[in-house]
């Protein structure tokens, strides 16, 4: 019988894309604390190396920062070679790179009659360039790293992929159609790939974080002038039964659980970590 602990994770090699970001950093802390060897693969090399060095010191663990663009297969192949050379063959992948952008965000939540003659603040004013960027980063940026970083797992007939979805994947939030569509695709892809790889020993799951204040949504949920919640930020808190934004550390338990053998019969699921948001009908 398995020991009921995260012991099996010790010494495993884990790659986390976007690992230098706010949520990524706390996940890396959890991985390092569990004794894993971690490669932070991030488009921002400098931050990746800085975060890796800090966590390596703090947790007395092996953590490296390397440059990789999740939208560029050649860059991912180069990153994999560097990880293989420095840490060994890869056991686990976390697809953490993702996010929204103001360029793919409508200014108004719902279109009103007054907008019909001036629709630039609505769906009709969205720039395709911004839409494509956000959709690709979240969807293709999950698919491509999976294609490159799981090949070592195939050889071992054992491995885990963890995708990072969002509350938007279940029901879209207003204003951010590209991000919502992309995260819904991430859920669908999580299920598809879980089925596709089930017989070769690779499990594929996702977590769907609720609301955490980070760089990508700060402009939407905080009021620049007062520093308090914006109307949208307040709405989120009101819609979260626990009555607050999450702390990034709240993701650590679900992450380690889905990576470890404790979840060895679980594949193709998306776990919400959301303070009850997805369970609440608002009344
Ligand atoms: P963040 O912006 O703090 O971090 C994202 C990281 O991804 C950054 O370090 C950035 O350099 C990196 N990155 C961006 N483009 C990249 C590329 N092309 N290749 C490689 N790396 C790239 O974001 P975060 O809030 O920590 O979000 C992490 C994940 O969690 C994302 O997938 C996001 O969509 C998801 N998420 C966040 C929240 C939230 O409330 N913040 C909620 C639900 C889901």
Image: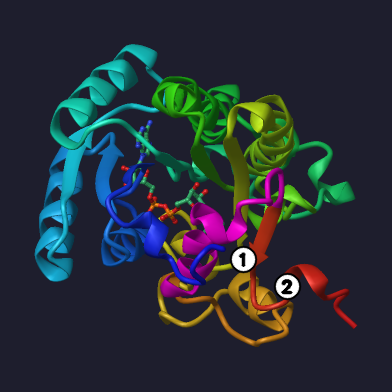
Q: Residues within 10 Å of mark 1 (few under 14, many from 20)?
A: many
Helix, strand, or loop for circle 1? loop
Look at the numbered discs 2 and 1 and tell me whether their residues touch, using CB distance below 8 Å.
yes
Does the stretch in magenta take in 267?
A: yes
Position of 17 compared to 238: left or right?
left
Decide if residue 23 is in sight here: no
Q: Quadrant of residue 131?
A: top right
- Left/right placement of residue 166 relative to residue 85 reads right
* Region of the chain picked out in magenta, as a range: 249-269
Label annotation for residue 277 = 2
Above or below, 84 against 218 in this view is above
Q: Position of residue 73 (x, y in %)?
A: 38, 15
Residue pictured at 12% horizontal, 65% vertical: 60
Query: How busy is the neighbourhood of tag 2: few (under 14 within 10 Å), some, or many (20 plus)?
Result: many
Residue 248 is situated, as x and y percent measured from the top left of the image, at 43, 70
Q: Residue at x 51, y 29 (%)?
A: 157
Vertical order, 78 against 61 (above or below): above
* Location of mark 1 (residue): 210
Magenta segment, prevailing SS (helix, strand or loop): helix
């Amino acid at each position: 019988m398995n020991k009921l602990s995260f012991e099996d994770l010790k010494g495993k090699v884990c790659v986390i894309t976007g690992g230098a970001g706010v949520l990524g950093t706390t996940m890396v802390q959890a991985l390092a604390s569990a004794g894993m060897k971690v490669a932070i693969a991030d488009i921002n090399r400098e931050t990746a190396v800085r975060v890796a060095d800090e966590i390596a010191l703090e947790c007395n663990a092996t953590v490296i920062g390397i440059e990789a663009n999740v939208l560029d297969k050649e860059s991912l192949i180069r990153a994999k070679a560097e990880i293989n050379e420095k840490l060994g063959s890869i056991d686990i992948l976390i697809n953490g790179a993702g996010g929204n952008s103001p360029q793919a965000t409508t200014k108004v939540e719902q279109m009103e009659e007054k907008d019909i003659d001036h629709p630039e603040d609505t769906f009709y004013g969205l720039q395709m360039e911004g839409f494509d960027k956000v959709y690709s980063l979240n969807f293709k940026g999950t698919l491509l790293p999976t294609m490159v970083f799981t090949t070592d797992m195939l050889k071992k007939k054992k491995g885990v992929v963890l995708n990072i979805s969002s509350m938007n994947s279940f029901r879209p939030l207003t204003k951010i159609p590209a991000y919502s569509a992309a995260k819904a695709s991430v859920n669908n892809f999580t299920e598809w790939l879980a089925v596709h790889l089930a017989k070769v020993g690779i499990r594929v799951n996702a977590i769907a974080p609720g609301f955490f204040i980070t760089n990508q949504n700060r402009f939407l949920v905080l009021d620049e002038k007062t520093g308090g919640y914006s109307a949208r930020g307040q709405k989120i808190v009101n819609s979260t039964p626990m009555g607050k934004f999450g702390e990034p550390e709240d993701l650590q338990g679900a992450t380690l659980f889905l990576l470890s053998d404790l979840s060895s019969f679980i594949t193709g699921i998306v776990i919400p970590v959301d303070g009850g948001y997805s369970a609440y009908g608002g009344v």
